Amino acid sequence: MIYNPEFDDKNDIFSTREFLCKLLPSLSKFELVSVNLNDLVRDYFKIHPEKDTVEYRLDPRIQQMIIDKLYPVLDNVCVYGGWMENRKDLWKGTYMDKDSRYVHLGIDLMADAESSAHSPLSGIVEDIFIDKDVDVGWGGRIILRPFDDKLPLLVLGHLEPKIFPFLGNTVKPGDFLGKIGKPPTNGNVFEHIHLQAISREFAEEIDFNYGMLDGYGVAGDIKLARNNPDPLSFSWH
Amino acid sequence: MSESENKGILRFLGICAVLCILIFLIIWYAPSIFKAKPTTVEYNGFHFEKVGALWYTQWQNGPYVYNVPLRYNPEEVQDVKIIGELSDKFNDPEKIYVTFDPNQNDTLKWVALAKGELIWSLIGPLQKNATDACSASSAECEGFPIVDCSNTDKSVIYLVPAKTSKVIAEGTCVVIEGSEIELTKSVDRFLYQWYGIMK
């Protein structure tokens, strides 16, 4: 273990807000509030048990409605969160049931469809993927490899699958990457962007076969947090 | 000069004296009243910056530099004592159980806050396999393992609301104590030790 108290201009400590606003500039006018999405959904169906069917719960319009209920309560906010959150109530009835793959490996940032997503870092577009799966798929997905090797790779998911930068292109902070997608082409989920960090070692371990990359993991797997550190714990630049 | 004119001059001089004293007091005390709290702290070679409610520093584990957010900076937790020692067994566990008593309803929100801060650091930068547990069964703890310090075959961190802030390490169990938000202060003291930022 190495301790590194060294600092340089590129590696300033940043706030969550600064990073998320760099990524989605449209958020700059909002306050950011961290929310446990699974608890939100679980509490909704506790109050409305008659509506708790798989079809209803997995309907992205219903998920969106449950999230949107927060906005009149929390004035002028944008909701985000979810790293290592166990979402067994949110995704009950999906492919995740098979091996209890409910642990969310990134963070979700709620934003309206069509909002522009920009690069928070200087790096290379390592992978582009259009996932047509509508059972909690990725939709449009980009993987960025930062030039700074002290940063892991960054995955951006649930984008509009038509607009993308070119594979292998260099990007710098602020460069336009794409737009927030909407269901069903965003993987058939509520409108948001999924941000997931993946360690460079893990990328090598899966032999850069990003097709097998999942946004969810099996609870109790010690490697989950190591392979997918909290994207909010880095100074992306 | 008439007596009334004398009184007028004396009154004027009296008012001037009071005003002078007031101005002097304002100039003397204003800096300490309006002095902004520091937003950066240097400690043991680590730089801390306050962003919102949290203090951030950077810490490297393996190839990555993490931004570590904690509620208190090291100077603020210096008064929290760490008593005792952990056995080597604690450092090489399959799992670290972070446990609490779910039946102390009035303190649960403080425990939840402290637990969130502790678990984030454990599974994030420190890369430990931390898992939620409870020290007794209750409705909230359904599905969670029941663990406390008597489980000497397990590595346990037990969060206990108590009047004094302290950290007691014994064998494979760490008891972290504090009252309300001070519980988070004790958690931060423990984490600073683990990060190697404090001795």
Image: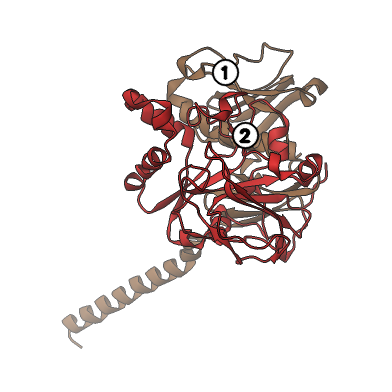
Chain colours: A red, B brown
Q: Is residue B17 visible?
A: yes
Q: Report the residue marked by disc 1.
A: B144
Earlier-in-chain disc, 1 versus 2: 2
Q: Nearer the viewer, mark 1 or mark 2?
A: 1
Q: Secondary structure at mark 1?
A: loop
Asked if the residues shown at circle 1 and circle 2 are in contact, with their CB atoms under 8 angstroms apart, the answer is no
The dot on residue B118 is: 2
Q: Mark 2 falls within which chain?
A: B
The amino acid type found where label 2 is placed reads Leu
Q: Is residue A8 above or below residue B151?
A: below
Question: Which residue appears at 41% of the width and 51% of the height?
Answer: A77
Residue type at the position of mark 1: Phe
Whether residue B136 is situated above or below residue A148 in the rendered picture? above
Q: Residues within 10 Å of mark 2 (few under 14, many from 20)?
A: many
Q: Nearer the viewer, residue B112 or B190?
A: B112
> Is residue A232 visible to us here?
no
Q: Quadrant of the rendered structure where residue A168 is? A: bottom right
Q: Residue at x 57, y 15 (%)?
A: B135
Q: Position of residue B35 (x, y in %)?
A: 51, 61
The CA distance from mark 1 to mark 2 is 18 Å
Residue A66 is left or right of residue A129, and the answer is left
Q: Residue A71 at what x, y percent from top left? A: 36, 47
Mark 1 crowd level (few <14, some 14–19, many ≥20, 10 Å Cα)? some
Above or below, B16 against B182 in this view is below
Task: Identify the mark at residue A155; answer none if there is no mark.
Answer: none
Image coords of residue B67 (percent x, y): 67, 49
